[in-house]
Amino acid sequence: MHYRALHLGVLIIRLGLGIMFLIHGIPKLMGGPAAWEGLGGAMASIGVDFAPVFWGFMAAIAETLGGLALITGFIFRPAMGMLVFTMFIAFMMHWTKGDPFIPSMSYPLELMLVFIGFLVAGPGNFTIPEIFNKDGQD
């Protein structure tokens, strides 16, 4: 198997998703408390109906920093954990609202599965930390 090609493929997926999550996350992060409250209201889908501004801010941070982590490889697994949780909440919000599976629920579910895969597999070899870790030691 050509492991270089495998790592290049992972990099392409990371860059594409990372850019998209920055595009989604930055406006949410810059939206301020009113936007965060609306976003954080999705936590009610799992019975958490307190502090929606905090939860919305955390979702905006997860998407923005998650995008940066995908692109760079920094804090990769913790960021993937945050994105898994964020996509789970998005899925549950659509589920409890009774939205149709396609496209409402399928998109966050698909991304949640991708992020679980990244959580298990890691970012691959082509990361910023890897550039500065020449000896291969973690």
Image (cartoon, rainbow, N blue to C red):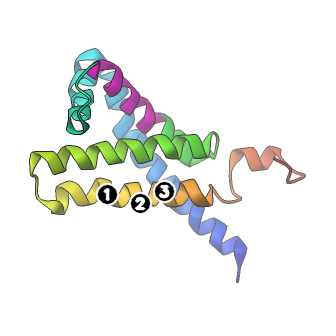
**Does residue 18 appear to the left or right of 72 in the view shown?**
left
| Residue 101 drawn at (x, y percent) | 16, 61
Q: From what the image shows, is residue 129 above or below residue 57?
A: below
Give the quadrant of residue 4. Answer: bottom right
| Gap in angstroms between the C-alphas marked 3 and 2 | 5 Å
Q: What element carries label 2?
A: helix
Q: In this figure, which residue is indicated by the disc labeled 1?
A: 109
Q: What element carries label 1?
A: helix
Q: What residue sits 24% from the left and 21% below the top?
A: 37
**Does residue 33 appear to the left or right of 6 in the view shown?**
left
> Dot 2: within a 10 Å radius of its alpha carbon, few (fewer than 14), some, or many (20 or more) residues?
some
Q: What residue sits 39% from the left and 54% below the top?
A: 112
> Dot 3: within a 10 Å radius of its alpha carbon, few (fewer than 14), some, or many (20 or more) residues?
some
Contact? badges 2 and 1 (CB < 8 Å): yes
Residue type indicated by callout 3? Ile
Q: In this figure, which residue is indicated by the disc labeled 2?
A: 113
Residue type indicated by callout 1? Leu
Question: Magenta segment, principal secondary structure?
Answer: helix
* Residue nearer the viewer, 121 or 20: 121
Q: In this figure, which residue is indicated by the disc labeled 3?
A: 116
Contact? badges 3 and 2 (CB < 8 Å): yes
Task: Evaluate whether residue 122 shows in this view.
Answer: yes
| Residue 110 drawn at (x, y percent) | 34, 61
Give the quadrant of residue 7. Answer: bottom right
Q: What residue sits 40% from the left and 48% below the top?
A: 20
Residue type indicated by callout 2? Leu
Give the magenta part as a residue range. 51-64
**Does residue 87 appear to the left or right of 133 in the view shown?**
left
Q: What residue sits 45% from the left and 53% below the top?
A: 17
Q: From what the image shows, is residue 117 above or below residue 22?
A: below
Task: Evaluate whether residue 67 shows in this view.
Answer: no
Asked whether residue 60 is drawn in magenta, I would say yes
